[in-house]
Amino acid sequence: MDLNKRKSISYAKYGYLFILPFFIVYLFFQVYPLCYTFYLSTQSNGDLVTESVGIDNFKILVGGQATTTPGHEIAGRAAKSAKQNFSRVLKNTVLLWGGNFIPQIIISLLLAAWFTDAYLKVKGKGFYKIVMYMPNIITAASVAALFVMLFSDTEYGAVNNLLVKLGKERVNFVSGVKGEARIMIMIIQTWMWFGNTTIMLMSGIMGINPSLFEAANIDGATPTQQFFKITIPLLRPIMLYTVVTSMIGGLQMFDIPYLYNAQAGAQNQTTETVAVFIYNNFHKTTQPNLGYSAAASVVLFFITVALGSIAFVTNKEEDPRSAHAKNMKKTALKQKLGGL
């Protein structure tokens, strides 16, 4: 029998069969809801019976005049109010995300550098990793409920009870309109996610070639110089991943702000995020604004895509081969101009 003519067997189809369930679930629970949200964003606000209104819902979000809405003066005031509300919740969302991500990344970088330092030889690294990651596995609703009870505005809250016993005034940690609740949410988010970020950065640092640190140490570089000249530049890919995933999660922040917002009541609007705004409009008991909520979701989707694209473009590393080709072209152009 000629071995060269023997029919080859391809096992690629079995691989496709194994990954098929994932794509079926992904299409049903991710792609279809996304497409349906785009469809709902072009439908009228109000009852479950919808009517196409084009881009009127998006016009309302930016304060424009809805063309299909009767009563131009009333509709104009409603659109202006809607724009102010959406601008407010978008500002709240960005502030809450930035306020927890900046301290989170600083703390995580310092801890990751400390735990991975070969010369410090920190004992009990496994224990510290478990303790730091523990808040991340607790549901956000449970964490929010715990902090609401600890920092309750009444004197029966643990912290306020202690302040009263010390002769201090109570602090409105939940319903405070001066930013107290917003600061509390930033602290909770930082506490919940810094462990996960630390472990991610630790894995990135441990992936750096140790010989680079050894050579820098031989050359007399201080630990600070090694951190800023070697560790930070080589952590660029994992830092980009951390920024993008944190940004996506931060812009969709819901559990903790919603529970704080529900406890504070309508008088405190500093904790209402875009996700809470969408939920509140979608689940109104009197008249649910399906199209309006869907339009806000679509706007948030495009904001997330835009910010993610900017992050990737600004942190994109140039291919060495393309950089070399560019340098060769520049050199050839200079030689050509010099020969003229």
Image (cartoon, rainbow, N blue to C red):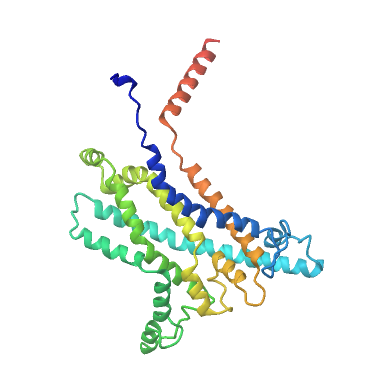
Q: Nearer the viewer, residue 333 or 145?
A: 145
Q: Nearer the viewer, residue 291 or 73?
A: 291
Q: Residue at position x 30%, y 45% from top? A: 225
User: Which quadrant is the N terminus positioned in?
Assistant: top left
Q: Residue at position x 44%, y 28% from top? A: 323
Q: Is residue 78 above or below residue 154?
A: above
Marks counted in the figure total 0
Q: Residue at position x 22%, y 42% from top? A: 217
Q: Nearer the viewer, residue 287 or 299?
A: 287
Left/right placement of residue 147 relative to residue 271 reads left
Q: Provide residue 281's location: percent of width, then percent of height.
A: 62, 70
Left/right placement of residue 1 relative to residue 286 reads left
Q: Residue furthest top?
A: 339
**Is residue 204 in view?**
yes
Q: Provide residue 27's location: percent of width, then percent of height.
A: 51, 52
User: Which quadrant is the C terminus positioned in?
Assistant: top right
**Is residue 176 in view?**
no
Q: Nearer the viewer, residue 51 or 232?
A: 51
Could you say which quadrant of the image residue 128 lies in?
Answer: bottom left
Q: Provide residue 250's location: percent of width, then percent of height.
A: 48, 60
Q: Provide residue 88's location: percent of width, then percent of height.
A: 60, 66
